[in-house]
Image (cartoon, coloured by chain):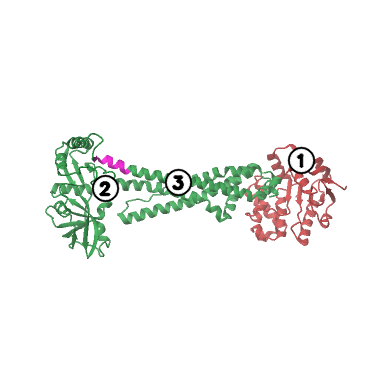
Amino acid sequence: MAERKKGSAVIELKDVHKYYRLGDSVVKAVDGIDVKINRGDFVAIVGPSGSGKSTAMNMVGALDIATKGDIFLDGVNIEHLPESVLAQIRGRKIGFIFQTFNLVPTLTALENVMLPMMFQRISLKERQARATQLLEEIGMRPRLNHLPKELSGGERQRVAIARALANDPEVILADEPTGNLDSKRGEEVVEMLKKLSKQGKTIIMVTHDMEKAKYADKIYRLKDGKIVNR
Amino acid sequence: MLLDFFRLGLNNLKRRKLRAWLTMIGIFIGIAAVVSLISLGQGLENAITGQFASMGTDILTIQNAETGFGPPGSTAITKLNEHDLKVIEGISGVEFALPRYIRTARAEFNRVVEFSTITNVPENQVEMEWLYSSGGLKAGQGRLLKPGDNGKIVVGKNFGADDVFGKPIVVGKKILVEGKEFEIVGILKTSSNFFLNSAILMMEGDLKDIMETGEEMDLIVVKVDNPDDSEAVAERIRKTLRNDRNKKMGEEDFSVQTPLDTLKTANTILIAIQIVVVGIAAISLVVGGIGIANTMYTSVLERRQEIGTMKAIGAKNSDILTVFLVESGLLGLAGGIIGVVIGGGISYTVSFVANIAFGSEIIAFNLPFYLVAFAIAFSFSLGVVFGAIPSYQASRLKPAEALRG
């Protein structure tokens, strides 16, 4: 993992809105966000549930498309790209970490970490080598061939982190990564994210736990789809 | 690359719930039916045609026409009789005509009474020998009947092997048929003609005597001078008998069968059986396919979050489509493999049992590689085809929505 140049903007949101239609009413999940996130930043997004944290995160991760506004990832506007290109961007530039871990239940820890590389058409040998290395680095060596259901919550999240790093992405998006873990395991996870940020990864973490948010360089508070602090 | 998707699909398949497998019973049945039908088909055909081919190609068979509805005797039908026999013998191209009797008689041995089929052997040496050779009759124990063997009988293989009468019959014993005592002089070898294996053969005079047949007979069998002329001779017999009996064309109360007709009848039966089996197979395969579609729909619903996750980590729509198509293909393939095993097992059992029951190699077991390969390839394709719509739907799920589950 090479040290990347810090400071320049890797993510930029310009007047981003996301509206949902819910019956007859329109829900303004995200209602005008302007923000720049620099390379190597560790950013926490906090706010009550329904404040638009996850929606904003999904749009940054190219999982969802904004109703209005532009999102630039590494200088590229991702708002008008076809799904196949977005899939490539997600696969190469972004690593996702979820609250519920979202490991594929039929695959072992090793196979789960190999999966993102399979979608990038990396050879089996290389996938195996890199996945093994990533899992070893986070102390999962004895658990390589275990299925998710045989792992504890903390172990599952560590596998998920290794999976997020598989294609060496620029940005890690973690949506409530500690939400399903006890405080000790949660702390371990945040420590890992902090370490990754020091290695040059840009980290965006959604959380409602202020203790965890304090690890971040910057905290954005969201309320009713808007950022309420600077 | 595709190999990776197969590996992924196999992983998912291993953890299938029982109900997913149950929906594939149709595939098992369909493939098993096709495989057993084809692998037995040739053997069955040989077995059936063998029944008739053993009779030779110089034989014509004249039968009473079907009497139709109503109790016997209620329709005005003239049964084949001595007069007809004389008429037929006079027709050119006919070498000789034999009356045949096939009756059920009361047989008693070892104080056990059974009803058995009895049939006649001509009194004349030449006719007798022709019947033996055209029917493939050979003595397994003792000897066949010869002219002047009145009061003597030959019995089919089953009497010697089975305990029909509580204990096996042996040559030299005496048996009561319709109350008259007969000496057993021989037991036939296993015949490919099933009927002969459990029949009693006796001299024509004896049979007419004990069954009081009078003028009437069951069949008339004709030997033609030249086998190539058998169709023409058959036509002459039809015409002559029609005139003799004052019947118009199409109103005959008799029928003349040539060896070709007999073979055709046999083949018609075989084709009918095949159509039924193929029909069952086709229905089963469609039901099985719908089962796969259903399983895949459920699977897509259950795995929305997994699909969302795969998209989040870089899977394109086409990747998701491939994942699910391969999986439903493998589901079909698994059904096909199980079907081939079941079908092969059925074939083997049928051929094994038939060979024990009717003698050696009557229905040969044959499971060619191309059949196995085709059945498996076909069932994989079936899975892909029926999994297409659910797989497409999975591939079109929006990532953010799918992730919410």
Mark 1 belongs to which amino acid?
Ala
Chain corresponding to green in the figure: B
The dominant secondary structure in magenta is helix
Mark 2 belongs to which amino acid?
Pro
Quarter occupied by residue B226: top left
**The hue in which chain A appears in the rendered picture of the protein:** red
The residue where tag 3 is placed is: B281
- Dot 3 falls on a residue whose secondary structure is helix
Q: Are marks 1 and 3 on the same chain?
A: no
Q: Position of residue A136 (x, y in %)?
A: 70, 57
Mark 3 belongs to which amino acid?
Ala
Residue A139 visible (yes or no): no
The residue where tag 1 is placed is: A66
Residue B71's mark?
2
- Which residue occupies 53% across, 53% down? B21
- Which residue occupies 21% across, 63% down? B109
Q: Nearer the viewer, residue B2 or A62?
A: A62
Instruction: Please state if B16 lies on the left or on the right of A224 as rendered.
Output: left
Q: Position of residue A164 (x, y in %)?
A: 72, 50
Image marks 1 and 2: residues in contact by CB distance under 8 Å: no
Name which of mark 3 and mark 2 comes first in the sequence.
2
Q: CA distance from mark 1 to mark 3?
A: 52 Å
Does residue A98 belong to the magenta stretch?
Answer: no
For discs 3 and 2, the disc positioned in front in the rendered view: 2
Q: Position of residue B273 (x, y in %)?
A: 37, 45
* Farthest residue, direction left: B148
Residue B217's mark?
none
